[in-house]
Image: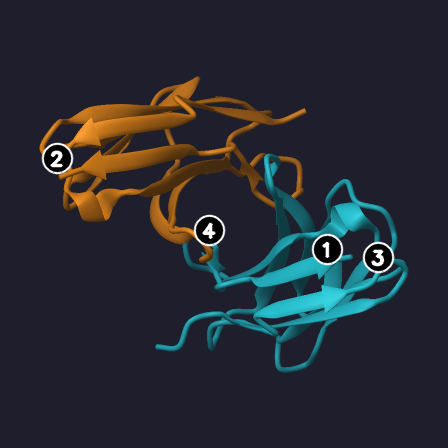
Amino acid sequence: EDQVTQSPEALRLQEGESSSLNCSYTVSGLRGLFWYRQDPGKGPEFLFTLYSAGEEKEKERLKATLTKKESFLHITAPKPEDSATYLCAVRAGGGADGLTFGKGTHLIIQP
Amino acid sequence: EAGVTQSPTHLIKTRGQQATLRCSPISGHTSVYWYQQALGLGLQFLLWYDEGEERNRGNFPPRFSGRQFPNYSSELNVNALELEDSALYLCASRSEGAGYEQYFGPGTRLTVT
C-alpha cells in the first residue's frame, strides 16, 4: 500500500528563519511526487512536480528536492504570506491514477 | 484562464439523504478527479473520470458514484448519507499529454446532520 508521511505536523517560524519540510514515501513505482499549498477553506494550489531522484525545482522562496525515499521542501527567508498547509502527494505505477496525499505540514510564519 | 469551478460552495443534508456535487474542469482538460478531505484524514482519492468513463476509484463504498458529461464536467453523487461523510469534497482536473499535475477547485463543504 502506498504511504506518504509528512513531518513535522506543524511548524512555527519567525519571518526570515529558513527551514525544511519533509515528505517520506513508500510507493511501488513512483511516477511523480507533487507539492501543493493549501490555505484554510480553499483547494490545494499546485507548486511542484518531481519525477526522479536528484531532481530539484524552485519557485520564489521555495525549493523542492527528491531522493529515492523522501522529498524536502526548503523555505528560504519566509514571509508571513507563506503561512499555509503544505501537502505532499505521490502518483504510483500500476494504472491507479489517483494521488496519495500526506496529511500535510501546517506552517506559520510570524512577523 | 478560468480555473476549476465547483458548486455548490456549501451543502447541508440530513442523514440518509442524497447529495449531488458538480465540477467544471479547466478548459481543455479531459480528466476529472474527486477527493474527500475529512478532518484529521487528509485528502483521499475517490474517483477518476476520463473521456466520459470511470477509470479508477479509491477505497470508498459504492454509494459514492458519479459521472462525466460530454463537455467533461462531472458530478459526484453520495447516496444514503452518513454523518462521517461530512467533509470538503475537492475536484481536480488534468490535461492529457501535459505533465501529470492536477489542478484543484475550491471544494464543496458537505455537512451531514
**Any part of residue A72 in sight:** no
The amino acid type found where label 4 is placed reads Tyr
Residues indicated by labels 4 and 1 sit on the same polypeptide chain = yes
Q: Residue at x 78, y 57 (%)?
A: B113
Residue at label 1? B55
Under tag 3, what secondary structure?
A: loop
Q: CA distance from mark 1 to mark 2?
A: 45 Å
Dots 3, 2 in contact, CB < 8 A: no
User: Front-most of A42 and B29?
Assistant: A42
Task: Find residue A54 and report its horizontal and vertical position in percent.
Answer: 28, 24
Q: Residue at x 55, y 62 (%)?
A: B107
Under tag 2, what secondary structure?
A: loop
Number of the label disc, if any, that sits on residue A15:
2
Residue at label 4? B100
Q: Tell me the cyan chain.
A: B
Residue at label 3? B81
- Residue mark closest to the camera, 4 vs 2: 2
The chain carrying label 1 is B
**Relative to B81, is A26 on the left or the right?**
left
**Relative to A108, is A42 on the left or the right?**
right
Q: Tell me the orange chain.
A: A
Task: Find residue B92 and report its horizontal and vertical position in percent.
Answer: 54, 60
User: Front-most of B79 and B83?
Assistant: B83
The amino acid type found where label 2 is placed reads Glu
Q: Earlier in the sequence, mark 3 or mark 4?
A: 3
The chain carrying label 4 is B
Task: Find residue B69 and report its horizontal and vertical position in percent.
Answer: 70, 78
- Outermost residue on the top side: it is A69
Residues indicated by labels 3 and 4 sit on the same polypeptide chain = yes
Under tag 4, what secondary structure?
A: loop
Dots 4, 1 in contact, CB < 8 A: no
Under tag 1, what secondary structure?
A: strand
